[in-house]
Amino acid sequence: MKIKPFKGIRPPKNLVEQIQSRPYDVLNSGEARAEAGNNEKSLYHIIKPEIGFPEGTDEHEPAVYEKAAENFRKFKEKGWLVQDEKEQYYVYAQTMNGKTQYGLVVCACVNDYMTGKIKKHELTRKDKEEDRMKHVRVNNANIEPVFFAYPDNSEIDEIVAGYTTNAPEYDFTAKSDGFRHTFWIIRDDRDIRRITELFAAMPAMYIADGHHRSAAAALVGAEKAGQNATHCGDEEYNYFMAVCFPANQLTIIDYNRVVKDLNGLTDETFLQQLTEDFEVEKKGKEVFKPTKLHEFSIYLNGNWYALTAKPGTYNDNDPIGVLDVTISSRLILDRILGIKDLRTDKRIDFVGGIRGLEELKKRVDSGEMKVALALYPVSMEQLINIADTGNIMPPKTTWFEPKLRSGLVIHSLD
């Protein structure tokens, strides 16, 4: 893997909490407008620039993208964002529920993405890619990082640990997620060289979160290479910003489903049809959470049910066939409920496990949804196996938490 250090553009210590934000794609325009409030320094003015326009403005209007670039220039002019003088790596730690994961902020190589060394496990949508490409182009920068996993490496762990015993550059608990975010700078040239060498020996890295951002950043880099008559390969646009975590530190949490109707079936008929492929056990009013692979839970009409897939309904030797999201999509959502395409069907919605199973119960009890389906989470091992075998996971399979905060550091393509 080819990585490099970079001259990060980032907030002065005393402004970081005012500037940092959640990623652009985890909240809508109204939520971003509310979170930014009267804070003119909020990064939402760059990553969700529609908040500076009347409500209802299409976020894909050319004027909205131009506003992002105008605000980015303003942040730099006012000294809210300042570029480091030296190319360096950064350590970014996140602490959730007493567990800390330590990531390295690096520049990954566009060519590694294009040749498949940076491996993906999800399909991307062209409209979302194009949106992020416009954002990268207009700002000439990767404003937000992507989230990668790399094979565990004890020497990298040691280098990182050497920095995390020092006083951090940034250290705050974000109000919107309650998680702690800590940030250090790796300035030592020997450490920088060694990190670069250790990554060079890795066969692959894996996109954990940010498939659209990765595609957009790489495509804009390739586009710039094609437009430069004197392109030589070491220009800054050949790289894009990523936070890379060792795979053993990451946790994938469940990603659950709620469905508006039973496809014309009564509750009793639906439950009866489930028994063809699952052992079904009524659990009653108490929330039931799946505890192992091939175990599911259903919430219907005030009751929870445990479902266990019967032998023969899945293939543990197939990287995709083994996934509970595959089993439930095929045998429940498609066969019984008639939902063929998870990307486009308006009868289904998805709920990140960070919200808990109570959120599923709430969506059904309110009458908005008829039935909820909770899944056991995918493991990092399964994700890596799928990426290594060139397979693609079904939509809405993985939910990583905590999310990366945006605005701690930015990468210029100049």
Image (tube, rainbow, N blue to C red):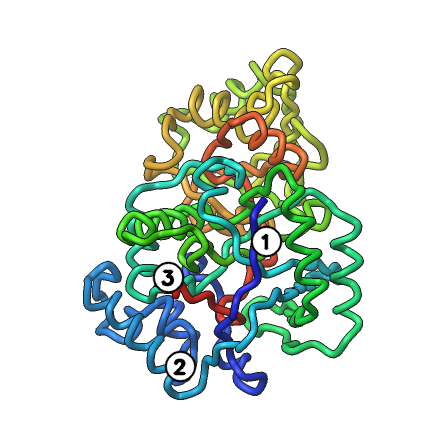
Q: Is residue 369 left or right of residue 326?
A: left
Tell me if residue 3 comes above or below residue 282 in the rendering.
below
Tell me if residue 356 comes above or below residue 30 in the rendering.
above
Q: Residue at horizontal 43%, vertical 60%? A: 236
The residues tagged by marks 1 and 2 sit, at their Cα atoms, a distance apart of 35 Å
Which is more N-terminal, label 3 or label 1?
3
Q: Which one is in front, 307 or 38?
A: 38
The residues tagged by marks 3 and 2 sit, at their Cα atoms, a distance apart of 26 Å
Residue 326 in picture, x, y percent from top left: 53, 26
Q: Residue at horizontal 66%, vertical 62%? A: 192
Tell me if residue 338 comes above or below residue 152 in the rendering.
above
Q: Amino acid at mark 3?
A: Asn
Residue 354's tag is 1
The residues tagged by marks 1 and 3 sit, at their Cα atoms, a distance apart of 18 Å
- Judging from the image, what secondary structure is the residue with disc 1 in? helix
Residue 28's tag is 3
Q: Is residue 50 left or right of residue 245?
A: left
Quarter of image, res 168 = bottom right
Q: Residues within 10 Å of mark 2 (few under 14, many from 20)?
A: some
Q: Label 2 belongs to which residue?
A: 76
Residue 60 seen by the camera: yes
Q: Residue at horizontal 46%, vertical 80%? A: 81
Which is more N-terminal, label 2 or label 3?
3
